[in-house]
Image (cartoon, rainbow, N blue to C red):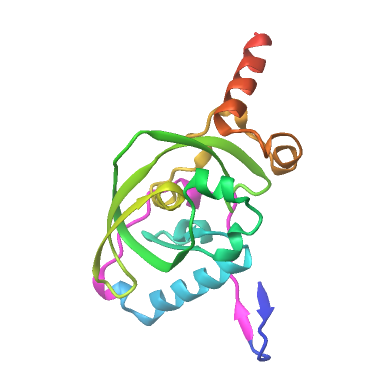
Amino acid sequence: MRRESMCGGAEMLLKIVQTGDPALRMRAREVRDDELRSPETQRLIELMRETMRDAPGAGLAAPQVGINLRIAIIEDKPEYLHDLGEAEIALRERSPVPFHVVVNPTIELASDLVDFAEGCLSVTGFTAVVGRAHSVRVNCLNHAGEPQEIRAHGWYARILQHEIDHLNGVLYVDRMYPQTFMTLENFKRTWKDIPPREIRRRLTEASLQLE
């Protein structure tokens, strides 16, 4: 897939694979130091960044573009918050996160679970309520192979957990509350302004009434 750039050149966009593709269910392999610094891997990171921004999304993992490497990129742009009210931004503890690369990460979940609706570029058109740790600590390498420690909370912690799950062959549908799985259309029409725990409660009760 190609997209014409403003200056007349062409930028290559990678194909984001969808649920059911085996690439999403494999544990990605670690990236060697020399491999990370290679022009090929640096180019892959650039292409992943353009693909994520085009989607658009706040994160993308290499397995989502069919590449079996422990590389993820994250960028939560200010404009992604424009459709959220101040109260919702505060509730999610969400603020812009600059572009950065996470390589060979290990993650420590440091707090209790918090429920929010979550989506995925590899499960397009759907969302569900997922419980994620409120805060995390991640040790990884950056794009240059330098060791990094990331301490994150709120929405940034959720993004990190989501992307690192991809590197382990895990999708959010494996962690969701099953009764809350729905189309984005239904979420926006019926549930958008309802707290996630209330969504979970109502849909769980509705399913129990059918038993």
Q: Is residue 149 magenta?
A: no
The image shows residue 26 at horizontal and vertical percentages of 42, 48
- Picture quadrant of residue 2: bottom right
Residue drawn where x is 62% and y is 15% of the image: 205
Question: Residue 25 in the image: x percent, y percent?
Answer: 46, 45
Main SS of the magenta part reads loop
Q: Position of residue 9 (x, y in %)?
A: 64, 89
In this rendered view, identify the residue nearer to me: 175 or 27.
175
Q: Is residue 118 above or below residue 37?
A: above
**Residue at image coords 51%, 36%:** 130
Q: Is residue 25 above or below residue 43?
A: above
Q: Out of 35 and 82, give the one closest to the viewer.
A: 82
Q: Residue at 50% across / 69% down in the picture?
A: 48
Single out the residue that lies furthest toward the front. 86
Q: Where residue 63 sits in the image (x, y, percent)?
A: 47, 57
Vertical relation: 122 (above or below) 76: above
Position of the N terminus by quadrant? bottom right
Q: What's the magenta region? A: 10-34
